[in-house]
Each structure stands twice: as structure tokens, then as C-alpha cells.
Amino acid sequence: MAFHGTGRQQTVCGNLFPGSELGHKYFCVNTSTGATSTGLSATPSLTGPTAPAGTPRHPTSLGGSTGGGAAVPQPHSSPASEVPSPAEMEPDRPIGYGAFGVVWSVTDPRDGRKVALKKMPNVFQNLVSCKRVFRELRMLCFFKHDNVLSALDILQPPQMDCFEEIYVITELMQSDLHKVIVSPQPLTTDHIKVFLYQILRGLKYLHSAGILHRDIKPGNLLVNSNCLLKICDFGLARVEEPDPSRHMTQEVVTQYYRAPEVLMGSRHYGSAIDVWSVGCIFAELLGRRILFQAQSPIQQLDLITDLLGTPPLSAMASACEGARAHILRGPHKPPSLSVLYMLSDGATHEAVHLLCRMLVFDPAKRISGSDALSHPYLDEGRLRYHTCMCQCCYSVPSGRVYTRDFEPPADRNFSHSYDNSLLSVWQGKELIHRFITEHQQGKRVPLCINPQSAAFKTFIRSTAWHSSKVSRKEER
Ligand SMILES: [Zn+2]
């Protein structure tokens, strides 16, 4: 991405995005369609060195000005390995559309590093969207785990009067598991084990913080070329509800990955819904096709019972009357789990055993994310991850020094006490503005969008187009 220094453009852009006393750096956007790649090389470097993600970065020195949107990074003090050469610099381009935002690949002008820029649209439309975005923003800043995507930075907000959109910077991942699964690239048992290990490792962290993701699907599992995986898109995530009398929305989880209790209209559910989704993804990794690909929620339920058999009444305790009647009206189905062995050669006894512990109809009997990590199927994935991919262990001349806890939980629960105290959009706007400003204090040189850049219009168009297409029911 090309960028401006703090030259003439500051005056122009400063009207929209007043800078701090330190000055600020602009993002501006080059146009390009860019070739789409799965990002997973034909011979993934499962044994290769760890990417330099997470290495310390330094703010760029201030005062220099390129004055006119140079397309190469400025010299700076970051380690050379982090700085792409001009030939390696890809232009900015859209890379994905999450539940509630558009994601672009851009270059951070402070260190030349490729990062992902997400615009959170329609933030202040109403109180519900305001709460939802604030929750997601706070989660992204809360997360500290290698298998969960977190915010590297938030762009400097303009003054309150002009504050309409929020831009978040996260680490850039080259692909996602959906693209990998549908690509012709080989997907070995080693890949599957190390992917599944990382999904469950990230999920254990989320659940230990009291967070339900509620939209685990291959497209929300980002991967890069050395097979590191991060769970992303927390637009539907929320804090676990301990009170079973409190109703929760049914408008969650992409249908193919939706747990039976949600399909059956249960008004209260827990972290087991995410484990079900992981089970579906595990089967999809093995068979390279969607496990339960139905046209409607009822057919989705029918496909599940075709495999698992008719559930006992006790497994439908929380189901709504209509859903229970639908199951009982139909013929009694025996389980046909042996078909799971036919998913692929990788569907070994161990693999199918773990799969059958995740795909349990009754959420109370389904394995937890944490317990799934103890399954022997994941031993090799754990070893591989901590031998050459993780950030928590390191090598010394005499060998590898392993971390004490391979799958650490969150050090505290995610707090959502602010949620109920939000009473108006304006109050929410003030809170979010203060949150971003406080989050930035004392950190790096603030960044902001350069609306004068040629392709900023393209960026805005793509986000506007997407916003108009997004019509998902939101939770109260
Ligand atoms: Zn480690």
C-alpha cells in the first residue's frame, strides 16, 4: 500500500482526521484486483521456522515527508526481516467479508509490514449495533493468544462529530480453511492434526474467558503459509450466559455448522455449540466436503439424525415443541457412524473416535474443547506445533525448551458489565471514542485513513456495497 508521510496531505486530511501533536501516518489505498491464492504452499513448511509474527516492532521516525504518496516503504528502524522489498509489496486489495465488516490487505506505513485493515460499518446506526461493535472491539483488544486473532491497532478516530466508522488493524493471514479445503492442494493427516490442534487450542482459550464464538466455520479460521491458524470474526461472539432462564438468539452459526440444540430451538445453549462446529470442520478436513450440507434447518436436522440416529428424549430436553414433534413423527433411525470411516484414508479409528465425541447430539454429553485436546489423536499435532510453530517454546543448543502449559486458558474472564450500562447511541459513541483513545495512549504513532488517496474511493465503494448486502438479524 502506498502511504503518505506527514507533509502537505496532513492539512488536507487533517480536516477529517485531526492528528495528534505527534503527527500521524496515513493509510491510502492502491487499486488492484489481485490474484486470489489459498496461501498454502504446495509443500507447506510444517517443519519450517516460525514466521516472524509477534516480533517487536518500532515506530517510524517522525518528521520526514514523502509528500506525495510514495509506493515504497520509508527507511525505518524495524528489523530487515519484517520489511518487504518493493518487489514484494502487493497493492492493497479486499481479502474478505466477515459477518459485519470488510477486510483489506494493506501496508502499515510505520514499518512496511503487511497487515489486515477491517472496517466496522454501520456502527452507530442503533443501540444494538453500537453494543455489538463495542463488544467485538473490546474482545479484539482483550485477546492474547496465538490461535485467536487480536487487534494490533485501531485507527485514530476523528472528532466526535465526524466519528462514524471504526478501522481495526490485525495481523494479515494469507488464507482461510475454507479456501484450503476447496483448493486442489494436498491436505495430509499432519495438516489436519495440526489445524485441529490449533482450533481447539484457540477455542479452549475463548471458552475459558467465558466467550462463545457462535460462528465457527472454515471461513473464520485464518491460516498462513506455515500452517499457523487463528480463529477470527467475533461479530456474533458473546459472553456465556450462566442463567438458563435467559433467552439467547437463534440467529447464530452458519447453518452447516449449527449444533442440533440450536436447530431444535433451544433458548439457552453453551460452549458445546462451538465444539459441534469444530466436529463438522474436522469431518470436512478429512473428507474435503461439507459434512451436513442441507438446504434448510429442518433438512439440516434430518441429515444429522441420519448419521447419529434418532436421539433419545433426554437429548431433546431443551428443544422447542415443534422440533421435538418433527423428530418423533419421523421413522426411528439407527445410527450409521461407520460411514465416517469412509471420509478418507485419514479417517482412522482414532480420528473417528474423536469425531464421534464431538458430534454428540446431546450437548451435555458432548466433549468439551479442553477435554478434546487430551485425545490421543491430537498428540502429534501438539508436538509438531510446539516443536516448530509456536511462540511459547524456544530452542537452545542443547534442545527445545517447552512451555509449562501447552494450552493455556485465559488469565481472566472477559467482562461485559458495560453492556447493560449502554443506554443511547451517543453515549456508546463517547464510550467507544474514549476506549480507542485510551487504548492508543503511549503506544505507536497513530494511524489514520488518507481519504485523498486515489483508491480510497474503491475501498469505500466495496465497503458500502457490502454493507448494503449485510442483513442479518441482530441480537437485542
Ligand atoms: Zn510452544
Image (tube, helix red, strand yellow):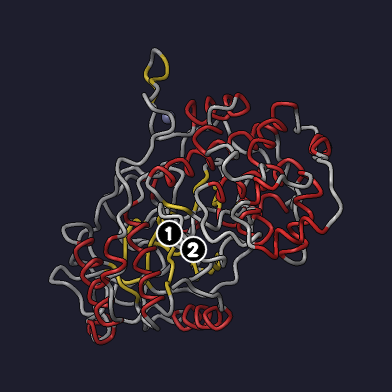
Q: Quadrant of ligand 1?
A: top left
Say which amino acid is labelled 1.
Answer: Arg
Residue 450 lies, in percent from the top left, at 34, 78
Q: Earlier in the sequence, mark 1 or mark 2?
A: 1
Q: Residue at x 63, y 27 (%)?
A: 377
Element type at marker 1? strand
* Quadrant assignment for the N terminus: bottom left
Horizontal side, residue 360 vs residue 213: left or right: right
Say which amino acid is labelled 2.
Answer: Met
Horizontal side, residue 310 vs residue 435: left or right: right
Cα gap from disc 1 to disc 2, whole angstroms: 10 Å
Q: Residue at x 66, y 42 (%)?
A: 360
Which of the labelled discs sits on residue 313, or is there none?
A: none
Q: Quadrant of residue 106?
A: bottom left
Q: Quadrant of residue 189?
A: top right
The residue tagged 1 is 238
Q: Residue at x 40, y 42 (%)?
A: 208
Vertical placement of residue 124 versus 172, above or below: below
Q: Is mark 1 within 8 Å of ligand 1?
A: no
Vertical placement of residue 325 versus 9, above or below: above
Q: Are marks 1 and 2 in contact (CB under 8 Å)?
A: yes
The residue tagged 2 is 248
* Quadrant assignment for the C terminus: bottom left
Q: Nearer the viewer, residue 457 or 439?
A: 439
